[in-house]
Each structure stands twice: as C-alpha cells, then as structure tokens.
Image: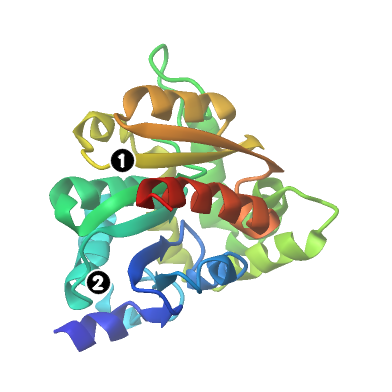
Amino acid sequence: MSDEIVERNNVQIRGRGERPLILAHGFGCDQTIWSRLVPWFEDDYRVVLFDYVGSGRSDPGAYDSRRYGRLDGYAQDVLDICRALELEEAVFVGHSISSMIGLRAAIREPERFDSLVLVAASPSYANIQPEFVGGFDRPDIEALLEMMERNFVNWARMLAPQVMANPEQPELASELENAFTANDPVRALQFARLAFLSDNRELLSQVSRPSLIVHCTDDALARPEVGDYLHAHLADSDLRMVEASGHFPHVSAPRMTAEVIRDYLDVRAGT
C-alpha cells in the first residue's frame, strides 16, 4: 500500500536531514510551486513533496469526484502519505487552501504533526457578515467560478497576474498561468469551489498543534486582517508578516519566507 500511495501522489523526497517537513501546494498548482523554497531547507530537513490527486503528476485514475468533493478527501491524501512514509511529528507547511486541509489532517491525527505553518491562509474567501470580513462577496466569487467554467484559459490568464502580483517579475505570473492551465478544467473547477466557497472557521478551535501564520503585507486573497483573525482564533499560534506582495510569497519572496519559517522552527527546536 505504501508504494501505491507514493506513486498515487507522486511523492518526492528531498534533503539531507531527518526531521520531516511536508510541503503541501494550494489550488491550481503542484509540488513544483515550492522549487524556490526547498533549497533553504534541504540541509536540515527531510523535505516531503507531493501532488494532491487531480493535480500535477498524481495518478489521474485515482481521482474520485465524491472523495475530492470534500476537503476531507484532500486531508486524507496527507494522512495517507504520512502513514506510507511512517511520519510522526512532522512540520506541515500548507499554502492557501492547503492550510485548511492541514488543519483537518492535524485534528484527525495530531500525533503526525509537530507544528503547522500556514502560508497565505484564510478560513473563508467569502465574507460572512458581520462575523468575518477580509475575503470577497459571494457574488464576486460565483462570477469568478462562472468565468472559469466558461473559458478556463482566459480565467487563468486573468487570475494569474492578479494573485501573483509583482509585475516587475512577469515570468512568475506566466509560470502560475501555465500551472493553472495544466490542470483538468472539470477537476480544477471542483477544487476551486471547495477552495473559494468553504467556511473553515469551526476548525480553528479544534487545533491542538502549534502554528505559524505567514501572511504578506499586500495580498488581495488573504488580507492582513485575515492573519489577525487566524492568530486570534488559533491557540498557540504566532503571526509573521512578510514584506511582500501577492498570494505566493514562497515564489515571489522565497528568501524572506524561508527565513521567517526557519526562525520559527529553530526556536521551537531550541537551536
């Protein structure tokens, strides 16, 4: 079974350390989105990279629309990988919606995780008045999803530069656009609905593992006030702001992002 999981999720191991560090990509991407961050951790960690089923070079035959019609299905991917590699007390680094997937996995099997790093995370991308503000009005999200369904290529071309930001580095937006369009449109739309319309606020009080919240000072998808909300509702959490723009600090500002994460992990390790 372990070999099947490794193949199913295209699991790759990097690094020369022993402590496991799991890097979980967000919606529309695959494990290659971490390529600029990995070198900062290879010396000291056993870096675990993977693709969620339906993304990247995962096994397309393993896709089940019922399983992956819920975020718990993606959390099961994470737990399956942990079991296959016999991981315990791993550091889980999740980007965007993967942060909420990681919370679900850690709630179900907390012994698998030492700590969680939540990069550009939000418990809800839709505003829920008056309790939660910092995302978008639901009609705007519905319009984005409708555009995605109507013309997937144009949707990718429009969204990539907006969420990547950093127009002085246009190659970054191009990379993200290519990552988006490499996805199967039907499966991507199903994942997008989960990512943009789910309300994960109820998870926050259930998390028992410590967490680091990493937010950019300028991110249209996960605004600074969302980081404040997470910090206020996650017990044993730290909040660090990266002086960067866009929703992908591990791509546009990998050094700053790596330093923030390493500082947190070094303090936890007592080094």
Q: Gap between marks 1 and 2, in whole Å?
A: 21 Å
Residue at left offset 28%, top offset 45%: 103
Residue at image mark 1: 210
Mark 2 crowd level (few <14, some 14–19, many ≥20, 10 Å Cα): many
Which secondary structure lies at badge 1? Answer: loop
In the depicted structure, whether residue 258 falls above or below residue 220: below
Residue at image mark 2: 81
Pick the front one: 117 or 158: 117
The percent coordinates of residue 10 (x first, y second) are 37, 81
Q: Residue 18 carries which label?
A: none
Count the labels in the image: 2
| Residue type, mark 1 in image | Pro
The percent coordinates of residue 170 (x first, y second) are 81, 60
Residue at left offset 58%, top offset 71%: 39
Pick the front one: 229 or 165: 229
| Viewport quadrant of the N terminus | bottom left
Residue at left offset 82%, top offset 51%: 167
Tell me if 190 is positioned left or right of 251 in this view. Answer: left
User: Which residue is at the far front?
Assistant: 271
Tell me if 1 is positioned left or right of 96 in this view. Answer: left
| Residue type, mark 2 in image | Ile
- Of tags 1 and 2, the one toward the viewer is 1
Which secondary structure lies at badge 2? Answer: helix
Tell me if 69 is positioned left or right of 128 in this view. Answer: left
Question: Disc 1, disc 2: CB below 8 Å?
Answer: no
The answer to whether any part of residue 64 appears in the image is no
The percent coordinates of residue 213 (x first, y second) are 46, 39
